[in-house]
Image (cartoon, rainbow, N blue to C red):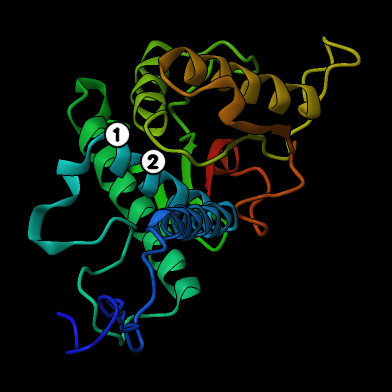
Amino acid sequence: MSKPGGGGQQPVIIIKKQGHGKHGHHGGAWKVAYADFVTAMMAFFLVMWIVGQSAEVKAGVAGYFRDPGAFSDGGRGVLPGAESGTTGGGAPMGATDVAAAKAALEQAAEEISRALAALPEFEHLKDQVEITLTEEGLRIELREAPDDGFFDSGSAMVKPSTFAMLEVIGAQLGELPNQVAVEGHTDSRPYSADSPGYTNWELSADRANAARRILEGSGIRPKQIEAVRGFADTRLRKLEEPLDPGNRRISIVVRRG
């Protein structure tokens, strides 16, 4: 409106008030990028941790991803010897690995014993088979007796009963990731003079190789065989009785992981 006596209307003045302490919206793309980065780092450190673990731990992780349901029974963890949950107090990783490896070999020994006991021919050979857990791993020994052996006399020809037993052992050991060594041993009786150049060294090595072929044909993977050795009479079982037939034996050593 005009003042009395004025010459026109007053100008309209608009006052805009600035906001206090507020900023414009910057968007959330950086949060997505940061989350991707953290996830990638977690995956990287998990892979690096797995690379540094033992064969048993790697096998446990691989088994979980092949069949997760197999690890849900009783609240057990993914790795051998591990318990589920978030509380502390567990055994150190090294001790857990050793315990898991020992438990796996003990279970293998029990399964091999049961499978061998199911063979008809095992009844009269059971006293010549010894399965023990040693520092180097699981040792399975087939020892000859005075009136019975696992090979034809003086040769590497495997008897049918021996073949059946080695097939059972090979099938069981083929389920394990452990490396296997096969050893042949003889007593101190000199080899027949009718075969010049062929000694207890050749005989022990040939018998070990014969056993290896059967084991591989029964389930053990070729890459699983670590060594095949013939020791002749250099590692007698009975040092005080070098001619004892028990010194003639095949040893199958399943290495610790």
Asked whether disc 2 touches disc 1, contact meaning CB atoms under 8 Å apart, the reply is: yes
Above or below: residue 220 compared with residue 39: above
**Amino acid type, label 2:** Ala
Local secondary structure at mark 2 = helix
- Can you give x and y, in whole percent of width and height, for residue 213 in the image? 56, 14
Residue located 45% across and 64% down the image: 97
* Residue in the picture at 30% in, 66% down: 82
Q: Which mark is residue 62?
A: 2
Which sits in the foreground, 63 or 144? Answer: 63
- In terms of depth relative to the viewer, which is nearer, 3 or 127? 3
Which residue type carries mark 1? Answer: Arg
Q: CA distance from mark 2 to mark 1?
A: 6 Å
Task: Compare residues 212 and 242 and report the one nearer the observer.
Answer: 212
Whether 178 is drawn above or below 105: the answer is above
* Label 2 CA crowd tier, 10 Å (few <14, some 14–19, many 20+): some
Question: Can you tell which quarter of the image residue 49 is in?
Answer: bottom right
The answer to which image quadrant residue 192 occupies is top right
Q: Quick check: 22 left or right of 195?
A: left
**Which circle marks residue 80 in the picture?**
none
Please indicate, yes or no, whether residue 180 appears anywhere in the rendered image.
yes
Residue 248 position within the rendered picture, expressed as x and y whole percent measured from the top left: 59, 36
The numbered disc on residue 66 is: 1
Secondary structure category for the residue under label 1? helix
